[in-house]
Image: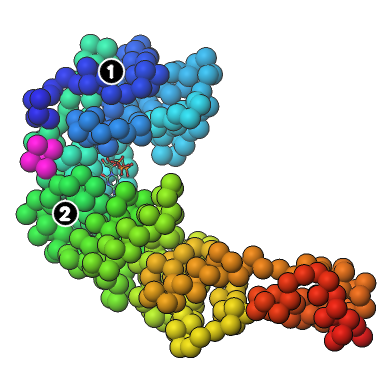
Amino acid sequence: MSASEQNNLSEIIEEQLPGDIFHFIQHAGDTANSLQQRIYLVGGVVRDLLLERINLDIDLVVEGDAIKLAQAINSEGRAQLVTHPRFGTAKLKWGHRSVDFATARAESYAHPGALPTIHPGTINDDLKRRDFAINAMAVELNPRHFGELIDPFDGCGDLNRQHIRVLHEKSFVDDATRIWRALRYEQRLDFTIEPATRLLLKRDIVYLKTISGDRIRHELELVLREEQPEKALCRAFELDVLTTLHPALKGDSWLIEAFKAARVRCLPDLPHPDFYLALLCYRLTANHLEQLIQYLRPAKTTTQVLQDTIAIKEKTKELKSRRLAPSEVYEILNGYHPVAYAVNAIAAGASAADYIELYLNVLRNVKPALTGEALKKLGVKQGPRIKEVLSKLRHARLDGKITTKKQEEEWVAKRHSS
Ligand code: CTP
């Protein structure tokens, strides 16, 4: 049955949601009824129920008071309750599950890019403030109407047409992060941004400037957590959105191949978003990267990964220039973030990549048998000298000049005992 033919989703809900969540939302509907409130399943989970995609991000909207209702649902205290009275929201957590409650609200925006001003409202108000028709559907959970679909903007029609469509022509002006969201849903679901929305998106790209770097970074992270982030990034490049992050960024066949290689390299896990981000930034110069870091202000480790990636890239020029002894390779490559090596192993040309693999698989594990303590006992002066001798021993080992502990002791006795 196509999405548009559904107007009661109770069977789909029962079939697709895990039993404990199904019983939980039934109980939530019963409790809301006894408090004369109305409760609805909303947003992404409704979209994904209709698409038969697994989504356990359960968002509930309450006409009434979400916090009071969450407290009543949890009257036996089996779940952990977290409330945010200022926003009229609550979260119930049990085991590995969690469910979000929000009080139905109407929104207005003081100016483009501002966070919205919020007032209590009806479910229709709440759906009206949302990004796309496919995300602006709700399912009632009160017993007499359990499973009834509320779809004021023909989200079902869009699911059938495979369209991403905004609800009104000022949607991207109100919140330009929706531009990134449109690309993400389009590419995740293999849909198309419908023509009028696409024109609005192009028109409103300038409003991305009204959004803080922190919020843009959050959107980019969501893209990088998609199954194939390169799809949304290439589409962002095609629509001149990617270059709003930095004009030198590109979404092209190089990026597609690099992201695919990252997934193979990280098996059985998925690449961390930092890994993808570093690949995206790989072709930037150090100066360009600093500009991007100033804008997005990523976490400290992410910044480290990005800077180290470019630093290693610069050094791979030395790796390509002539044949190097293992100790030289070690010195050139030592001291960076592990992800930065992996990124360069993928992105640098073949010969540099060989050196990086050699460093990762062999050289970085080579250590002298003697410790600092042992050197002291052998008469090496305390202080920086110890580090120096350890480093020389490591080099000698790396280049195969020393292979045993006994040889190390002899080497120290000969040259460094005073
Ligand atoms: N929403 C919106 N505008 C935004 C962010 C969110 O209208 N800028 C609405 C959408 O209705 C969305 C819901 O809030 O469905 C929940 O947001 P989020 O969790 O980000 O969306 P999901 O649809 O659940 O997305 P995903 O499938 O990626 O988790």
Q: Nearer the viewer, mark 2 or mark 1?
A: 1
Q: Is residue 359 left or right of residue 165?
A: right
Q: Residue at x 37, y 54 (%)?
A: 263
The main secondary structure of the magenta stretch is helix
Q: Is residue 389 visible?
A: yes
Q: Amino acid at mark 2?
A: Lys
- For ligand 1, tell me if the residue under mark 2 lies within 8 Å: no
Task: Specify few, some or many for label 2: CA neighbours under 10 Å numbering under 14, 14-19, or 20 or more.
Answer: few
Does residue 143 sit above or below 336 in this rendering?
above
Q: Residue at x 53, y 19 (%)?
A: 78
Residue hosting label 1: 14
Residue hosting label 2: 170
Q: Residue at x 47, y 37 (%)?
A: 84
Residue 18: percent from left, percent from top = 36, 22
Q: Is residue 383 magenta?
A: no
Q: Secondary structure at mark 2?
A: loop
Q: Amino acid at mark 1?
A: Glu
Does residue 369 sit above or below 6 in this rendering?
below
- For ligand 1, tell me if the residue under mark 1 lies within 8 Å: no
Q: Which stretch is magenta?
A: 158-162
Residue 379: percent from left, percent from top = 93, 78
Residue 120 lies in quadrant: top left
Q: Quadrant of ligand 1?
A: top left
Does residue 256 sit above or below 18 in this rendering?
below
Q: Is residue 387 visible?
A: no
Calculate the distance from the C-alpha at mark 2 to the C-alpha at mark 1.
37 Å
Q: Residue at x 85, y 75 (%)?
A: 409
